[in-house]
Amino acid sequence: MDWKKTLVFGSIAAGAALFMSGRKPAGLAVAGIGVAVFASQNPEKLEEIWNRMPEYVEKGSRVVDIAAGFLERFSPRGGYRNVSAAGGNRY
């Protein structure tokens, strides 16, 4: 694996970890570096991913719905109320 692929995957993974740990601006900046390097090396692949983005969002939404249903079914309180990241206002 060459250094550019390592930079792309590493920065996207680090950005995701920072984003999920609550450091959203830093996570977006680090992930943005990986996306920029990827775009400079593979503009046609980035265009293909961009064009298929609605399909990816739909699949991700289905996964979140399945996970929410699973948590609701097995929650001891009869429902999982903290699914605000999927569609509510957190602040």
Image: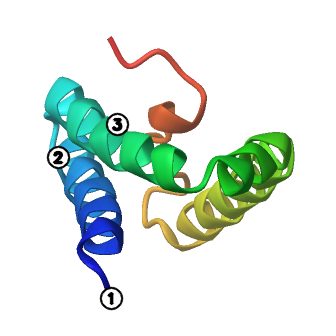
Task: Mark 1 and mark 2 in contact? Answer it, CB < 8 Å.
Answer: no
Question: Looking at this view, is 29 or 36 the one in front?
Answer: 36
Tag 2, which secondary structure?
A: helix
**Coordinates of residue 59 in the picture (x, y in percent):** 78, 59
Closer to viewer: mark 1 or mark 2: 1
Few, some or many C-alpha atoms within 10 Å of disc 3 (few <14, some 14-19, many ≥20)? some
Task: Mark 2 and mark 3 in contact? Answer it, CB < 8 Å.
Answer: no
The answer to whether 56 appears left or right of 32 in the picture is right
**Coordinates of residue 17 in the picture (x, y in percent):** 21, 55
In 3D space, how far apart are the residues under numbered discs 2 and 3 (Cα atoms)? 12 Å
Tag 3, which secondary structure?
A: helix
**Coordinates of residue 46 in the picture (x, y in percent):** 66, 48
Residue placed under numbered mark 3 in the picture = 32
- The residue lying at 24 percent from left, 56 percent from top is 11
The answer to whether 87 appears left or right of 36 in the picture is right
Tag 1, which secondary structure?
A: loop
In 3D space, how far apart are the residues under numbered discs 3 and 1 (Cα atoms)? 21 Å
Residue placed under numbered mark 1 in the picture = 1
Few, some or many C-alpha atoms within 10 Å of disc 2 (few <14, some 14-19, many ≥20)? some
- The residue lying at 19 percent from left, 57 percent from top is 14
- The residue lying at 34 percent from left, 36 percent from top is 32
Tag count: 3
The answer to whether 12 is drawn above or below residue 86 in the figure is: below
Residue placed under numbered mark 2 in the picture = 18
The answer to whether 91 is drawn above or below residue 38 in the figure is: above
**Coordinates of residue 1 in the picture (x, y in percent):** 33, 88
